[in-house]
């Protein structure tokens, strides 16, 4: 039974990795990547894919999350709880939007 699960998992894993990603690098860059992969006991492909995956997740997280200081948090919450009156420009923009959208 374990053998069947292993084979099934391997097939599913190979199926899910159907996409290719190619990149041109210098000889020095490839040697550096290979050295790092060797140090970690990984294949070059595994090293590159996992490294890119890690940095992609980090970039997305930094883009989607805001880290505010205590003072920034207080100002933000105060603006949400006590919003300023809309300016004339904002009122005019809202009217134009309503007219164009037929709302």
Image (cartoon, rainbow, N blue to C red):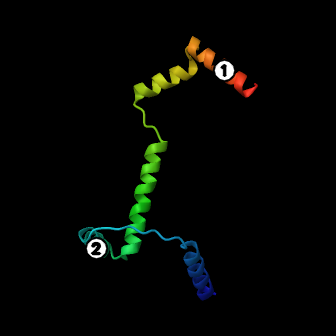
**Image quadrant where one finds the C terminus:** top right
- The quadrant the N terminus occupies is bottom right
Q: Is residue 74 left or right of residue 10?
A: left
Q: What residue sits right under mark 1 in the picture?
A: 96
Residue 74 seen in the figure: yes
The residue tagged with tag 2: helix, strand or loop? Answer: helix
At 35% from the left and 68% from the top, the residue drawn is 24
| Residue at point 37%, 70% (across, down) | 47
Asked whether 93 or 87 is in front, the reply is: 93
Please identify the residue farthest to the left as the structure is shown: 28
Q: Quadrant of residue 30?
A: bottom left
Taking the image as shown, residue 45 lies to the left or right of residue 93, namely: left
**Quadrant of residue 89 within the rendered picture:** top right
Q: Position of residue 23 (x, y in %)?
A: 38, 67
Q: Residue at (58%, 11%) from the top-left corner?
A: 88
* Structural distance between the alpha carbons of marks 2 and 1: 62 Å
Secondary structure beneath label 1 = helix
Percent position (x, y) of residue 31? Answer: 26, 73
Question: For residue 40, what is the image quadrant?
Answer: bottom left
Residue at the far front in the pictured view: 100
Residue 71 drawn at (x, y percent): 41, 25
Q: Residues within 10 Å of mark 1 (few under 14, many from 20)?
A: few
Front-most of residues 58 and 71:
58
Q: Residue at x 42, y 66 (%)?
A: 50
65 in relation to 68, above or below: below
Q: Residues within 10 Å of mark 2 (few under 14, many from 20)?
A: few
Could one spot residue 85 in this view of the protein? Answer: no
The vertical placement of 19 against 11, above or below, is above
Q: Is residue 77 above or below residue 62?
A: above
In the picture shown, does residue 91 fall above or below 38? above
List the residue tagged with mark 2.
39
């Amino acid at each position: 039974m374990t053998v069947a699960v292993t084979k099934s998992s391997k097939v599913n894993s190979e199926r899910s990795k159907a996409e290719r990603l190619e990149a041109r690098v210098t000889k020095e860059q490839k040697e550096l990547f290979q050295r790092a992969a060797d140090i970690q006991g990984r294949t070059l492909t595994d090293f590159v894919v996992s490294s890119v995956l890690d940095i992609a997740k980090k970039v997305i997280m930094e883009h989607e999350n805001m880290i505010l200081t205590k003072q920034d948090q207080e100002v933000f919450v105060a603006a949400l709880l006590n919003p300023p009156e809309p300016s004339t420009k904002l009122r005019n923009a809202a009217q134009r939007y309503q007219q164009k959208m037929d709302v």
